[in-house]
Image (cartoon, grey):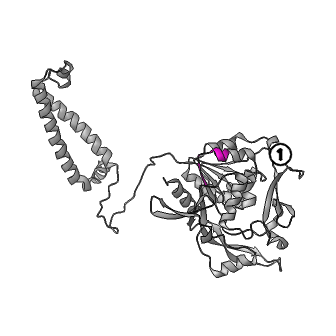
C-alpha cells in the first residue's frame, strides 16, 4: 500500500488540472447525451441501438453499469499517468527530496559501424552502450585478435570486431619525396621524414606485390555491418593507418557509398609527421573523398585550445594541432539540435562541427638521448565520453 500511495502521490501537482479536465469531460458528455436523447426521440434508429444503449435494463442499472465502466477506465488512466514524472514549471532546485528521473527510449538504439584502428577503435568501442550493435571494422592490415585481446581489459557492450578480409593485406604509402614505405614502419617516428606527407596509398600482399583486392574474399559480415548501419563513424585514429586502408577495398567503398547511414569522420587532433604534415581539416576530408569516393556528412573537429607547454611538446615531435581555418569555409548553415541552435560550416561538402573532443592525460615517455631515462608529459587524447556525446547529438539532428 505504501508503494501505491507513493506512486499516486506523484499526481499531487496534477490534482487541479485533472479536476478541471474531468469537469470539462462531464459537461461534454452531458451535451452529447442530450443530442442522443433528442435523436432517439425524433428519428428511427437501427435495431442494434436497443442493445447499444442498454435499453433492456432498468435505467438505474444502466447508469450504474456505465458509471462502473467509467470508473475502471478512469482508474487505469490515472494509474498509467502516475508512472510519468511530472515536474511543475515553477519548480526550484535545492529541495529536500531527491528526485530521480527514469525514462524509456521511444526509439530503437542506432546500429553503428566504426572504421578505425589502434587505440582509436578501443576508445570509440565505449559507444556500444548507446547502440543496439557497434560493429568495429578493423584495418585490413591488422589482425583482429589484437582488438579482442585488448578489449578483454574492458567491458564493452554490444561490440563486435570484424576484419574486412580473411587474408591480411599490407598498406604502403608513397611520400612527396618519391620514397615508398610500409605503413607499419612507423614513418611518423623517422626524423628524416618528419616534414613529408603522403601523396598515394596502396594495398599490397604479404610478398609486397600490389594486391588485386577483387581476387581476395571479402567478409560478408563486414559488408552487412556497413549496409545495415544507421551511422558509419570513421575514426578516431591515424588517417593513413587506421581509416583509409579499408577504403582501398572497392567493395567496402561501394557499400559505404550506397549506404543511407550518416557518415561521420572524426578528424585527427594533431598532424602526423611523415604522413599528414601540413594537413588542414580540408586536406583530411579531401583524402576521404579521393579514396572513398564520398564526402562525410559530418566532420568532428576538436575546438579545444592547448596550453603553450603541451604545444611545445608536440612541436618538438613535428606535430601541430588540426584546427579549422576560416579560409576553408564554403558556407555557414544553422542546425537545430535538441539543446541549442548551432552554427556550423561546410568544408569540402561536409558539415564541420567544432566541439571539445579531447582530454589531457599524463604519459610516460622515453628519452632519445638517454634511453634509460624517462619523463612524464601531458598529451591530448580523444575523450570517449565527449566523442559519444558529440556523435549522439549528430544522430538526434533532424
**Which of the 4 image quarters holds residue 190?**
bottom right
- Residue furthest to the top in view is 47
**The residue tagged with tag 1: helix, strand or loop?**
loop
Which residue corresponds to the image point at 56% horizontal and 57% vertical from the top-left? 391
- Say if the magenta span includes residue 259: yes
Q: In terms of depth relative to the viewer, which is nearer, 304 or 322?
A: 322
Instruction: Provide the residue span drawn in magenta.
Output: 255-263
- Say if the magenta span includes residue 55: no
Q: Residue 308 in the image: state x and y as whole percent.
A: 65, 81
Q: Residue 224 in the image: state x and y as whole percent.
A: 66, 41
| Circle 1 Cα neighbour tier, 10 Å, few/some/many (<14 / 14–19 / ≥20) | few
**Which of the 4 image quarters holds residue 278?**
bottom right
Residue 383 showing in the rendered view: no
Query: What residue does disc 1 label?
Result: 212
Q: Is residue 230 found left or right of 174 in the rendered image?
A: left
Q: Is residue 99 found left or right of 331 in the rendered image?
A: left
Q: In terms of depth relative to the viewer, which is nearer, 256 or 167?
A: 256
Q: In terms of depth relative to the viewer, which is nearer, 13 or 227?
A: 227
Q: With respect to residue 353, does 15 lie above or below?
A: above
Q: Residue 19 in the image: state x and y as whole percent.
A: 19, 49
Residue 326 showing in the rendered view: yes
**Which of the 4 image quarters holds residue 165?**
top right
Q: Residue 144 in the image: state x and y as whole percent.
A: 74, 50
Q: Is residue 154 found left or right of 4 in the rendered image?
A: right
Which residue corresponds to the image point at 20% horizontal and 24% vertical from the top-left? 52
Q: Is residue 365 found left or right of 385 in the rendered image?
A: right
Which residue corresponds to the image point at 85% horizontal and 73% vertical from the top-left? 192
Amino acid at each position: 500500500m505504501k508503494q501505491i500511495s507513493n506512486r499516486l502521490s506523484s499526481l499531487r501537482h496534477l490534482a487541479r488540472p485533472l479536476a478541471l479536465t474531468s469537469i470539462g469531460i462531464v459537461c461534454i458528455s452531458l451535451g452529447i447525451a442530450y443530442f442522443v436523447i433528442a435523436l432517439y426521440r425524433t428519428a428511427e434508429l437501427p435495431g442494434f441501438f436497443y442493445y447499444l444503449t442498454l435499453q433492456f435494463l432498468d435505467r438505474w442499472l444502466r447508469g450504474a453499469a456505465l458509471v462502473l465502466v467509467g470508473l475502471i477506465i478512469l482508474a487505469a488512466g490515472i494509474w498509467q499517468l502516475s508512472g510519468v514524472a511530472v515536474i511543475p514549471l515553477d519548480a526550484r532546485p535545492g529541495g529536500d527530496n531527491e528526485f530521480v528521473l527514469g525514462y524509456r527510449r521511444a526509439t530503437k538504439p542506432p546500429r553503428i559501424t566504426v572504421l578505425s584502428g589502434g587505440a582509436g577503435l578501443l576508445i570509440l568501442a565505449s559507444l556500444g552502450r548507446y547502440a543496439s550493435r557497434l560493429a568495429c571494422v578493423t584495418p585490413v592490415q591488422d589482425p583482429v585478435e589484437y582488438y579482442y585481446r585488448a578489449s578483454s581489459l574492458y567491458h564493452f557492450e554490444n561490440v563486435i570486431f570484424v576484419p574486412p578480409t580473411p587474408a591480411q593485406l599490407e598498406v604502403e604509402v608513397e611520400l612527396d619525396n618519391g620514397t615508398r614505405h610500409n605503413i607499419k614502419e612507423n614513418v611518423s617516428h623517422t626524423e628524416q621524414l618528419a616534414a613529408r606527407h603522403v601523396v598515394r596509398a596502396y594495398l599490397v600482399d604479404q610478398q609486397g606485390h600490389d594486391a588485386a583486392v577483387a581476387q581476395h574474399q571479402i567478409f560478408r559480415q563486414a559488408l552487412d555491418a556497413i549496409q545495415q548501419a544507421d551511422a558509419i563513424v570513421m575514426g578516431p585514429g591515424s588517417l593513413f593507418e587506421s581509416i583509409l586502408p579499408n577504403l582501398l577495398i572497392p567493395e567496402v567503398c561501394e557499400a559505404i557509398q550506397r549506404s543511407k547511414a550518416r557518415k561521420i569522420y572524426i578528424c585527427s587532433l594533431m598532424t602526423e609527421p611523415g604522413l599528414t604534415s601540413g594537413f588542414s581539416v580540408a586536406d583530411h576530408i579531401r583524402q576521404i573523398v579521393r579514396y572513398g569516393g564520398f564526402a562525410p556528412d559530418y566532420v568532428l573537429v576538436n575546438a579545444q585550445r592547448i596550453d603553450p607547454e603541451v604545444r611545445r611538446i608536440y612541436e618538438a615531435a613535428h606535430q601541430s594541432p588540426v584546427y579549422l581555418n576560416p579560409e576553408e569555409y564554403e558556407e555557414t548553415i544553422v542546425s537545430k539540435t535538441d539543446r541549442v541552435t548551432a552554427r556550423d560550416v561546410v568544408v569540402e561538402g561536409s558539415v564541420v562541427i567544432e566541439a571539445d573532443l579531447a582530454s589531457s592525460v599524463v604519459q610516460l615517455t622515453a628519452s632519445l638521448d638517454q634511453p634509460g631515462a624517462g619523463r612524464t608529459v601531458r598529451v591530448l587524447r580523444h575523450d570517449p565520453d565527449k566523442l559519444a556525446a558529440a556523435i549522439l547529438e549528430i544522430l538526434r539532428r533532424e
